[in-house]
Image: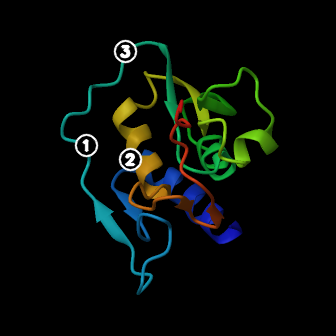
Amino acid sequence: MIGNLARGIAVAAAAIGGALFVSGASGLARNDTPSVLPRAASDVALFPERNEQTAVFAGGCFWGIDAVFKHVKGVISVTSGYAGGVRQAPSYEEVSSGETGHAESVKVVYDASQISYGQLLEIFFSVHDPTQLNRQGLTSGPSTAPPSST
């Protein structure tokens, strides 16, 4: 986990400065050779003056995503929590059971004059592999799909 976190922070720093270098979608490549991702073609220009925006990311375990975004220039605040689900204000243990239907998520408030939503997405997908069902890095568990109502 610490290795992935360190890679994520390095990826976040590199993303702000130019091309995005990653070591694989989950932070670990088979040959550990960094890949270069192209800049987002549909990204919007930065705002000319301070403009607070909010984005929410759900990527398995929120601790790693939280830690990466806290080191990104232009990010004002990062708050870990839960999205979706059937219980109001569930505990970590309840969500971890897989029975509430919640997904661990991170709310990122950012200044769109310093970083774009497209750049945030690039950073997110450099540390999150959406192809891993019921697993993200060292975190594994049941799907966060809402429980059936039967």
Residue type of the residue flagged with mark 2: Glu
Name the spot of residue 117 as percent of width and height, x first.
Answer: 39, 31
Dot 3 falls on a residue whose secondary structure is loop
Callout 3 touching callout 2 (CB < 8 Å)? no
**Position of residue 20 in the picture relative to residue 3 (left or right):** left
Give the Cα distance between marks 2 and 1: 8 Å
Residue type of the residue flagged with mark 3: Pro
Identify the residue at horizontal 51%, vertical 51% (top origin). Answer: 12
Q: Which residue is mark 1?
A: 40
Identify the residue at horizontal 59%, vertical 56% (top origin). Answer: 9
Dot 2 falls on a residue whose secondary structure is helix
Q: Earlier in the sequence, mark 2 or mark 1?
A: 1
Name the spot of residue 133 as percent of width and height, x first.
Answer: 46, 59
Q: Which residue in the rendered view is the most extreme toward the left?
A: 41
Dot 1 falls on a residue whose secondary structure is loop
Q: Counting other residues with Cα less than 10 Å from the Cα at mark 3, is it few (<14), some (14-19), or many (20 or more)? A: few
Q: Above or below — where is 88 with respect to 128?
A: above
Residue type of the residue flagged with mark 1: Ala
Q: Nearer the viewer, residue 117 or 141?
A: 141
Q: Above or below — where is 137 with respect to 126?
A: below
Q: Which residue in the rendered view is the most extreme toward the bottom?
A: 31
